[in-house]
Amino acid sequence: MRSSPKIKRVQLIINQNNESVLVGIVSAEPDYKLSLTLNRKLKISLKNISPLTITDDAGTEIVFSRFSDISSSQGQAFDLISNRSEKNYLIRKLKNIDYLFQIHNPDNEVFTERIISMLRGTESVTAVFNIDTNILKDKNLHYITQ
């Protein structure tokens, strides 16, 4: 009789750190131009994906454009979401902010600060704000932080 081969156990290390950093961007550029500029500056690959659709209190669907990059080998992902759709806002308390840039699973604070610094150095970006999602209270925030 043949002996069964020895079974080897492999331990998978899964990073269950689902934190993300939310950054507000003020820019007069349209979303597609800003995504191309950020792709070049940050060396990422933001691509237009299905838009973020929410329903307001009156039952009207509001569509916000969304660009995403999940190609990073280190587990980081990036989202660029428009904060405006005609006269509506995704996050009403942030009316002065045109776009929300989300960094999923950042390595550390140095990585986040480097990204924010690069965003501030981008020509078409007027201002960049680090947004604390723990302090910000808005009913639409859960669409972003899922």
Image (spheres, helix red, strand yellow):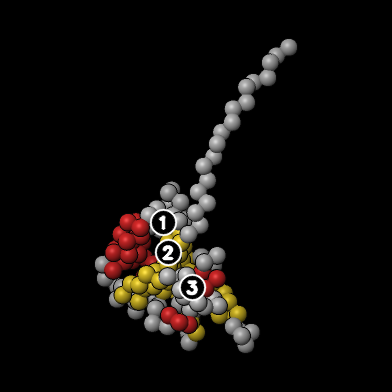
Q: CA distance from mark 2 to mark 3?
A: 19 Å
Task: Give above or below for 62 relative to 105.
Answer: below
Specify the quadrant that holds the C terminus: bottom right
Query: Does residue 31 appear in this view?
Result: no
Residue density around tag 3, few if under 14, some if 14–19, many if 20 or more, within 10 Å = some
Please name which of the two marks, 2 or 3, marks the residue nearer to the observer. 2
Q: Nearer the viewer, mark 3 or mark 1?
A: 1
Q: Are marks 1 and 2 in contact (CB under 8 Å)?
A: yes
Looking at this view, is 48 or 9 the one in front?
A: 9
Question: Residue 37's x, y, as percent?
Answer: 33, 66
Picture layout, residue 29 above or below residue 69: below
**How far across and how far down the image is residue 120, in percent?**
28, 69
Q: Toward the viewer: 106 or 133?
A: 133
In the image shown, does 91 or 27 lie closer to the viewer?
Answer: 91
Determine which residue is flagged by label 3.
65
Residue under label 2: 21
Q: CA distance from mark 3 to mark 1?
A: 23 Å
**Circle 1 sits on which residue?**
106
Mark before the other along the chain sequence, 3 or 1: 3
At label 2, the amino acid type is: Val
